[in-house]
Every structure is written in structure tokens, then in C-alpha cells.
Amino acid sequence: MRQVIRGAVLLLLLLIVVPAPATAQQQQAVVRVGTEGTYPPFSFHDPQTSELTGYDIEVIKAIATKAGWRLEFVETQWDAIFPALDSGRIDLIANQVSVNDERQAKYGLSNPYTYSRGVVVRRAGDDRIKSLADLNGKTTAQSSTSNWAKVARDAGARVEAVEGFAQAAALLQQGRVDAIVNDNIAVLDYLATTGSKDVEIAGDAGSSGSRQVLAFRKNDALQVQANQAIDALKADGTLRGISEKYFKADVSREDGGAADLSAGRGPRSTWDVLLGTAWPMFVGLVKVTIPLTALSFAIGLILALLVALARISPYRVLSGLARGFISIIRGTPLLLQLFIVFYGLPQIGLKFPPFTAAVVAFSLNVAGYAAEVVRSAILSVPRGQFEAASTIGLGYSQTLRRIVLPQAARTAVPPLSNTLLSLLKDTSLGSVVLLTELFRESQLAAAESNEFLALYSFAGLYYWVICVALSAAQKRLETRLNRYVIA
């Protein structure tokens, strides 16, 4: 019996000490791929399944199969995608990155996997614009960090920054800009999918074509693996097959023929778009927007109390530090604070996951604004109550907890409620730090369907309902706190 027990113990120890052999999936390198998810037909969400798909997505999946990678897709706005690569948030960009001198100098660029050309897009019948030369002195709509924005600027145009082509096309139709410079394939997909007759291709944006590549950090071994995979996929016809599926031409070769997107992806009614997006938006609200708001406000409120107490402290060092913190937070934009926490701090070794980074930035922002609210509420309590508490033997902390803060809370609730409502709406900025929250879901759907009014209004309805509920909770809380008022 002892031998059996001893054998069982030894077996158990072996199971604990000796690690189980890694599965094939665990042995694969995890590669984080940055992409927009709002740039059809290259990177977009299937309206039926909400899954990320597109030409670039299928290409990078084929490359991953050849290279032995396990992919993790990270969606973000185009203007934030290169900062995400620089800060190590992603390992590569698969989003029709065009080759130019600046990118070649700063990044590792793969072999080309797409060849296209730039075109100038104008409002239908606008004969003022026929070529790139006609953009001098005009206004175009572009993603500010895209290669096409540089082409437009070099032609003398003033560039208005937008997130993607769908937004640019909307501005052009509304007469807010004069033209767009963009990839001909993206333009053809837009025209075929929407059936729009309001915009048209005026001509080519220069004589030379454009090469699209994957972008890596300099001297990254992944670049070599990607190049080998791209060459193999070209040789075995895989790239040609993916290309012909989307474009009826082989755009993976420079002379592969003109892309044909006349079939489009089929327009959907506004009602179908809303029905298809209502659930993803609700999930974004429940999984990201509400938890981010609640956690950031709770932490921010604790920090605000500490800063407020430091602000009224008789110690000059504490008071000065508190004033400096409040001044910095209130004197800089929230968007800038998000970028500093998420993209800037990794350069000094402080790297937070997206949700944590958002909580840090929003909490500090709440603390900066709420600290003055808390301070004024504390000072509104008559000084005599501090003195009365002292005479009955209560210390400073006991006086605050039992006498001052309960009365100050009633004064602070209305302005703090405004801070909470502002925070809820400010979480819509979470997409710039790679969070897919409520508003980001509406952006994804709008980029694919061009139903901006319906989708953004529907997102606004979600925010409004939550704000109404919070306002009702504020009134109930004020009623409960009335009992602390001393007549």
C-alpha cells in the first residue's frame, strides 16, 4: 500500500514539475496586426456576421499560415495606427500602407502585395477639377497621415483630416470640400456598393502607380518571414486567388489588370443596418463604456478627495503640488492625456493594456476637475463645525468622515454628477487607444454602410438613455443626503 501511495505522489510531482508539451497553437508566435476595420474592401466588418474581413485581412491570414504565426487583430483609427506600431502596441500594419520615402526611412516595409493607382475624386459634374494640377488652392478630405494626404498637399491643396474614405465622400457630397485623393480600388468599391451618383473619378493622381506593403518596426525578424511568405504566396497562386475573389483582377502584380468592383457588396436598407448594429453597440456599451465609466469615476473621485485635501492643506508643498496637478489636467485636452498615457509612457517603460491606459487617463482627468468641486464643498461647511468636533475629542480624520464629508457630499453631488455624465460621453474617445466601445461600433458600421445620420443618432440614443438613468439616480441620492443638513 505504501508503494502505491509513494508511486502516486511521485507521479503527481512529475505532473506538477514537468510542464506539459506545448500545443502547436501555443508554439506559434502571436503577432498583433493593426488595421482600421473601416476601409472596405481591404479591411471592414461583414454586415451579416460582424466579423473582420477584407482583402488585406485574407492576405495577412494567408501570410500567417505560411510563416507559422498566430494572429491577433487590433483595430484602431488610421491616424493612430503608426503610433501604435511605434509604441509596441502592435507588431505590424496590414491596411494598404503605401510606400513613400518617409516610411522607408523609419519603418521596415515588406515586399509589395498590392499594386494600385491614385485617383482624384470630385462632385459629379464639377468641371473645375479634372486632374491633380487643379487641386492647387482647393480643399481635399484625407486621412491626415496617409500617403494620399501628402500627394494632395504637394499639389497645393489644403487638407481636411478625416478618419476614412466614407467620411471624406460625405464631406465631398455636402460641398464641404472640393475633392478627394485616394486609392482607385477603394473608390471603385465605394461607388459600386453605395450606387452613389454624387461623386465621380475625375482622373489619375499622377502617372506612377502605388505599391502597398506591410509595415514593421525597423530590423524586425517578422519582416523577413513576411517577405518569404509573400513570395511563396505569389508563386503558388494564393495571392492571385484572393485578389480575383475581390477585384476580378490580379492586383498582386503590377500588370495584373484593372480592378472590377461593379458587383459591389450590395446596399442595405437603413433599417437593416440599424438592426444589424444594435446588438454590437449594446455589447460595446455593456462591456467597455459602462465599466470604463464606473471604474474611472470611482478611482477619480478617490484621487479628487486626496487632491482636494492637499489643496486646502496648510503645508505649502502639498498645496503647491495639488494646484500644479489641477492646472495641468484642466489646462490640457483629454485626448492629449490619452495619447500621452497610451503612446507616450511606453517610451519610458510604462506600458499599460488599452483598458487600463484608458482608466488611468480618465481617472486623472476626473480627479483634476472633481478636486475643485470637492474642495469647494468641504469649505462650504461652516468652520464652527470643525471647532465643535474638536471640543468633543474628534480628530481631523474623524471630523472629516463623520461630520464634514456627509454634509459636503450633498453640495458636491450636482456638480459631480455633471462630471460623471461628461465622463460617460468622453469614453467615446476610447477608440484612439484601441478600445471598441459603443461609439466605435457605430463608426465601424457607418464606414461600411455610409448610414451616418441613422447610426450616430442611434448611438446618441444609447448615451441619452444612460444619462437619463444617472440623472434619476442623482435626484434620489440628493434626497437621501438631505438628512445630513443641519438646520
Image (cartoon, helix red, strand yellow):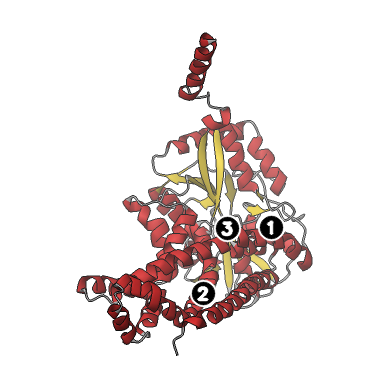
Assess whether mark 2 and mark 1 are in contact (beta carbons under 8 angstroms): no
Taking the view exactly as shown, the residue that stands out farthest to the left is 316
Instruction: Report helix, strand or loop for mark 2.
Output: helix
Q: What residue would you read off at disc 3?
A: 436
Give the structural element (helix, strand or loop) at label 3.
Answer: loop
**Disc number at residue 384?**
none
The foreground one among 459 and 168 is 459
Pinpoint residue 475: horizontal percent, then vertical percent.
Answer: 57, 80
Spatial CA distance of label 1 from label 3 is 25 Å
Percent of width and height locating residue 44 = 64, 54
Q: To which residue does mark 1 refer?
A: 189
Q: Which residue is mark 2?
A: 422
Q: As shown in the figure, which amino acid type bears the numbered disc 1?
A: Asp
Q: Is residue 109 left or right of residue 331?
A: right
Relative placement, left or right, of 476 versus 388 is right
Which badge, 1 or 2, comes first in the chain's sequence?
Answer: 1
Residue at the location (68% across, 66% down)?
Answer: 450
Does the residue at mark 1 contact the one at mark 3 (Cβ under 8 Å)?
A: no
Residue 323 in view here: yes
User: How far is disc 1 from disc 2 in space, using C-alphas?
Assistant: 38 Å
* Residue 119 appears in the figure: no
- 288 to the left or right of 446: left
